[in-house]
Image (tube, grey):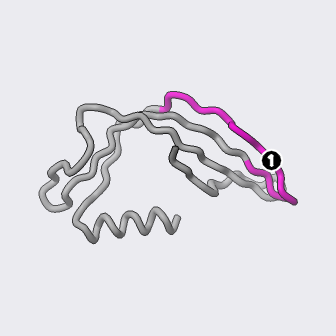
Amino acid sequence: MSYLAEELSENATHGRRNEVSGTRLLKADVGEAWREGDTDYATAAMRYESIDLMRDRTTGAVLSGDPDRPTETVELWTFARRAGGPWKLSAIQAN
């Protein structure tokens, strides 16, 4: 969470805001699952498309991205749970 907060803060400091819309999951697979002590882990590979824009915070002008074309992204999301508890997101890695 601290990484995401840092990124949001940096964008705000530089007068930018990230805008993501039209997200559509294309494919998801569990890539691996394992246990370390009493903690279970699972990593899912997710391929999705979205409209991902960076806008000027004041004018709303598009600084990067295309408002008419989605881009495709692949990310690895790792989840963890302790002793059969609820799954919690523990890491996101962009490919």
Left-right relation of 91 to 49: right
- When asked about the image quadrant of residue 56, the answer is bottom left
Percent of width and height locating residue 95: 52, 44
Residue at the far left in the pictured view? 59
Residue range in magenta is: 25-41
Give the x, y percent position of residue 78: 65, 50
Against 27, residue 65 (above or below) is below
Whether the magenta-drawn stretch holds residue 27 is answered as: yes
Instruction: Look at label 1 and name its amino acid.
Output: Trp
Q: Image point 55% across, 29% down: which residue?
A: 27
Does residue 40 appear to the left or right of 65 in the view shown? right
Q: Secondary structure at mark 1?
A: strand
- Residue 77 at what x, y percent from top left? 60, 47
Seen in the picture, residue 68 relative to 57 is either above or below; the reply is: above
- Quarter of the image for residue 36 reads bottom right
Q: Residue furthest front?
A: 95
